[in-house]
């Protein structure tokens, strides 16, 4: 039995209690908070999780130009590293096992003018490795997320992500798989998952349209079969969105709340049905 959660950033600035109510209503085990240690209060979140009997499976780091892990300039690099450390502290507070790390800013599809791809890669490896020592002390793991080429440039597929993680070579740095990005970037989803199996510690689920699993064309039967075959033990976290261009604008949609209810329900019932079918 996997632990099921839903990531929090997709509902925008919705009242957190409404989010907890949705998760409880549709049978989720927990939540994935966005890693914003300054805006989320750990103690309040712990109390709410306790009230709703939900756990925190994971934290989703938010990586923009202000937290650019590819930075070589010491002040900028230090800022990005500090964000990871602060997020580790928040992870400890809410009991999250892992923190999602995207090695280059989301929304930037080529390296900055000051340096090229190779330097960005080298700097991101060093910066993440530095922060990983802190994560290890605190018992938290980083999971590197490959994001598709239309949203970021450094690590777009699982093969690159594996190369990246091997270069970091740190016990507290593993990999995650996001089925939406994989639908764009992977040649064969099952094979890609098997290749990264020993490093796989977290999974995001959305269909190829980024809607709830079960609404599009991704073969989730194969996904569940492969996860079982490789002995995956982590959480399954829903990260769906409506079919629009800018994911961060999704929260502006008038129908957002009822749409999120619908997606939350469809995704968990569909994946649990497949999980039951693959466990016999
Ligand atoms: Mn994701």
Image: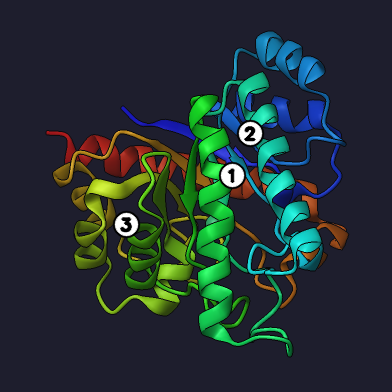
Mark-to-mark CA distance, 2 and 1: 9 Å
**Foreground label between 2 and 1:** 1
Q: Is mark 1 within 8 Å of ligand 1?
A: no
Mark-to-mark CA distance, 1 and 3: 34 Å
- Residue of label 1: 131
Does residue 5 appear in this view?
A: yes
Ligand 1's quadrant: bottom right
**Foreground label between 3 and 2:** 2
- Residue of label 3: 220
CB contact under 8 Å: marks 2 and 1: yes
Quarter location, residue 75: bottom right
> Helix, strand, or loop for circle 3?
helix
**Front residue (pair 172, 75):** 75
Give residue 227's position: percent from left, percent from top: 24, 47
Point out the image quarter for the N terminus. top left
**Neighbour tally class for label 2: few under 14, some 14-19, many 20 plus, Cα within 10 Å:** many
Q: Residue at x 23, y 51 (%)?
A: 197
Q: Is residue 65 above or below residue 51?
A: below
Q: Is residue 140 above or below residue 262?
A: above
> Helix, strand, or loop for circle 2?
helix
**Front residue (pair 79, 155):** 79
Give residue 70's position: percent from left, percent from top: 63, 69
Q: Earlier in the sequence, mark 1 or mark 3?
A: 1
Q: Which mark is residue 253?
A: none
Give residue 186's position: percent from left, percent from top: 34, 75
């Amino acid at each position: 039995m996997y632990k099921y959660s839903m990531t929090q950033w997709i509902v925008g600035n919705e009242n957190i209690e409404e989010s907890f109510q949705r998760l409880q209503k549709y049978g989720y085990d927990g939540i994935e908070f966005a890693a914003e240690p300054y805006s989320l209060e750990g103690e309040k979140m712990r109390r709410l999780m306790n009230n709703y009997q939900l756990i925190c499976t994971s934290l989703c780091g938010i990586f923009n130009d202000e937290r650019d892990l590819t930075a070589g300039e010491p002040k900028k690099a230090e800022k990005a590293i500090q964000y990871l450390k602060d997020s580790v502290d928040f992870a400890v507070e809410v009991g999250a096992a892992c923190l999602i790390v995207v090695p280059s800013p989301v929304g930037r599809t080529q390296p900055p003018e000051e340096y090229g791809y190779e330097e960005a890669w080298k700097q991101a490896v060093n910066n993440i490795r530095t922060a990983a020592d802190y994560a290890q002390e605190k018992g938290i793991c980083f999971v590197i997320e490959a994001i598709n080429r239309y949203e970021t440039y450094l690590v777009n597929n699982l093969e690159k992500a594996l190369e990246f993680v091997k270069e970091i070579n740190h016990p507290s740095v593993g990999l995650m798989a996001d089925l939406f990005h994989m639908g764009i970037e992977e040649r064969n989803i099952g094979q890609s998952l098997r290749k990264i199996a020993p490093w796989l510690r977290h999974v995001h689920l959305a269909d190829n349209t980024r809607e709830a699993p079960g609404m599009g064309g991704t073969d989730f039967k194969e996904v569940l079969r492969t996860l079982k075959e490789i002995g995956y033990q982590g959480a399954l976290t829903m990260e769906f969105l409506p079919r629009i261009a800018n994911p961060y604008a999704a929260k502006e949609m008038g129908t957002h709340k009822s749409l999120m209810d619908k997606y939350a329900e469809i995704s968990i019932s569909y994946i649990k049905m497949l999980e039951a079918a693959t466990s016999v």
